[in-house]
Image (cartoon, grey):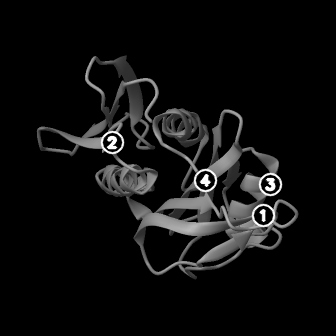
């Protein structure tokens, strides 16, 4: 079941990085992620609903993240992958792994062990990994050779630990900064509370 019902709005920031988010409580049992396209009216789309599975919720969130980044100036519009990996419920506790979830972008790695690459490191540490140059990250997994920078944010559900990660890749170095970290971490917290995690 979904937890808090929140309106999550993104509007392009002046520093050309990820849009600033605005959180507003709403009465309806839905979670909205909305953002403005340049030269277009504000667009709102449903991200979560108490009756939807986490797959539906993450699919909508991945699409909206992708289009939000693509609507912004460079380097944000150079994002080449945006999506999720979820914790594999069938993997043993002694060898946890992530499995590919909903995403936008090129075909991606299907499984990633905790501790491997940027995604696995974020999952194992339970902490955001902001990598300005993936070539300098030990053990980086190059699912898309065009990726030059990456940010991975763990989704931590109460009593369950890391249940998923948000992964966003960019085709240029230094594609992400602390603005991205702050607001993607807020999104991770919202999704942690708004999905029926296994």
Q: Is residue 172 left or right of residue 31?
A: right
Across and down, in percent, residue 135 comes to 72, 72
Number of the front mark, 4 or 2: 2
Q: Quadrant of residue 142?
A: bottom right
* Residue depicted at 83% across the width and 59% down the height: 93
Give me the residue at 55% from left, 38% from top.
192
Residue 13 against residue 121 in the figure, above or below: above
Residue annotated with mark 1: 96
**What's the residue at 69%, 67% (across, down)?**
90
Q: Secondary structure at mark 1?
A: loop
Q: Position of residue 154 (x, y in %)?
A: 65, 47
* Disc 1 crowd, CA 10 A, few/some/many (<14, 14-19, 20+): some
Pointer 4 or 2: first along the chain: 2
Q: Nearer the viewer, residue 86 or 19?
A: 86
Q: Which residue is mark 3?
A: 124
Q: Which element carries disc 4, helix, strand or loop?
A: strand
Locate residue 34, reporting x and y percent: 28, 37
Residue 117 visible to the viewer:
yes
Q: What residue did someone put label 4 on? A: 165
Q: Which residue is mark 2?
A: 51
N-terminal of the two: label 1 or label 4?
1
Task: Choose the circle earlier in sequence order: 2 or 1.
Answer: 2
Of circles 3 and 1, the one toward us is: 1
Left or right of 127 in this view: 73:
left
Point out the tag, 4 or 3, that comes first from the N-terminus.
3
């Amino acid at each position: 079941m979904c937890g808090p019902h929140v309106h999550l709005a993104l509007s392009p920031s002046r520093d050309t990085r990820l849009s600033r988010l605005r959180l507003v409580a709403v009465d309806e049992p839905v979670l909205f992620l909305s953002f403005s396209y340049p030269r277009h009216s504000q667009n709102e789309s449903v991200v979560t609903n108490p009756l939807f599975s986490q797959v539906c919720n993450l699919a909508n969130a991945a699409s909206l993240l992708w289009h939000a980044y693509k609507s912004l100036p460079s380097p944000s519009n150079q994002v080449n992958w945006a999506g999720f990996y979820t914790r594999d419920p069938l993997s043993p506790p002694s060898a946890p792994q992530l499995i590919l979830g909903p995403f936008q972008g090129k075909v991606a790695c299907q499984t990633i062990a905790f501790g491997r690459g940027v995604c696995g490191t974020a999952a194992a540490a339970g902490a955001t990994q902001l990598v300005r140059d993936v070539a300098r990250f030990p053990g980086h997994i190059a699912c898309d050779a065009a990726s030059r920078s990456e940010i991975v944010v763990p989704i931590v559900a109460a009593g369950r630990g890391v249940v998923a990660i948000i992964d966003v890749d960019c085709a240029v170095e230094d594609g992400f900064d602390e603005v991205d970290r702050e607001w993607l971490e807020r999104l991770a917290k919202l999704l942690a509370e708004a999905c029926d995690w296994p």
